[in-house]
Amino acid sequence: MNIHGSCHCGNIRFDLDWGGQPDAIPARACTCSFCVKHGGVWTSSPQGRLRVTVEDPSLVSHYAFGTKTARFHICSR
C-alpha cells in the first residue's frame, strides 16, 4: 500500500510504501506535549519505506522532544 501526503502548501511531501496490503493501519496517540497540542499519532511498519521531500528547506524548522526518538519537520508557510 502506498500512502502520499504533504503539509498544506506542499513544501514538505512524503511517500510511504507500507510494505503490503493491511486490512487496517494501527495508529497510536502520542502523549508528548507536541503531539497532544497538534493531534499527532504514530505508526510503524518494519517492512515499510518512507521518503520525505522538502522543496524549500529554509521554510522548515525541526523539533525533537526529550528522547530524540522522533524528529518533526514543521513548515512555516
Image (spheres, grey):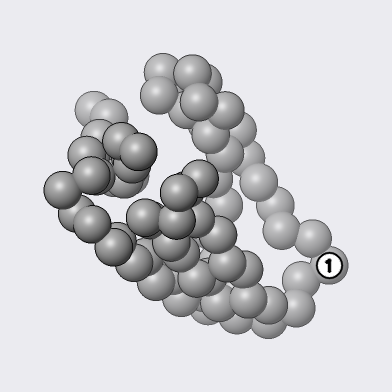
Residue that appears at 53% across and 34% down? 40
Compared to 1, does 31 lie above or below?
above
**Type of the residue with mark 1:** Asp
Residue that appears at 43% across and 61% down? 13
Can residue 69 be seen by looking at this rendering?
no
Farthest residue to the bottom: give it.
Answer: 20
Farthest residue to the right: give it.
Answer: 23
Farthest residue to the left: give it.
Answer: 58
Of residues 37 and 57, the one nearer the viewer is: 57
Quadrant hosting residue 61: top left
Report x, y in % for residue 7: 47, 48
Residue that appears at 23% across and 57% down? 56
Q: What is the secondary structure assignment of the residue under circle 1?
A: loop
Quadrant hosting residue 41: top right
Quadrant hosting residue 4: bottom right
Report x, y in % for residue 51: 39, 71
Q: In the rendered image, which residue does mark 1 sit on? A: 23
Residue that appears at 41% across and 18% down? 33
Quadrant showing the C terminus: top left
Horizontally, is 55 left or right of 40 in the view?
A: left
Quadrant showing the N terminus: bottom right
Horizontally, is 66 left or right of 51 in the view?
A: left
Report x, y in % for residue 46: 50, 71
Report x, y in % for residue 26: 70, 52
Q: How many marks?
A: 1
How packed mark 1 is, by other alpha carbons closer than 10 Å (few <14, some 14-19, many 20 or more), is few
Can residue 21 be seen by looking at this rendering?
yes
Of residues 53 and 49, the one nearer the viewer is: 53
Compared to 72, does 5 lie above or below?
below
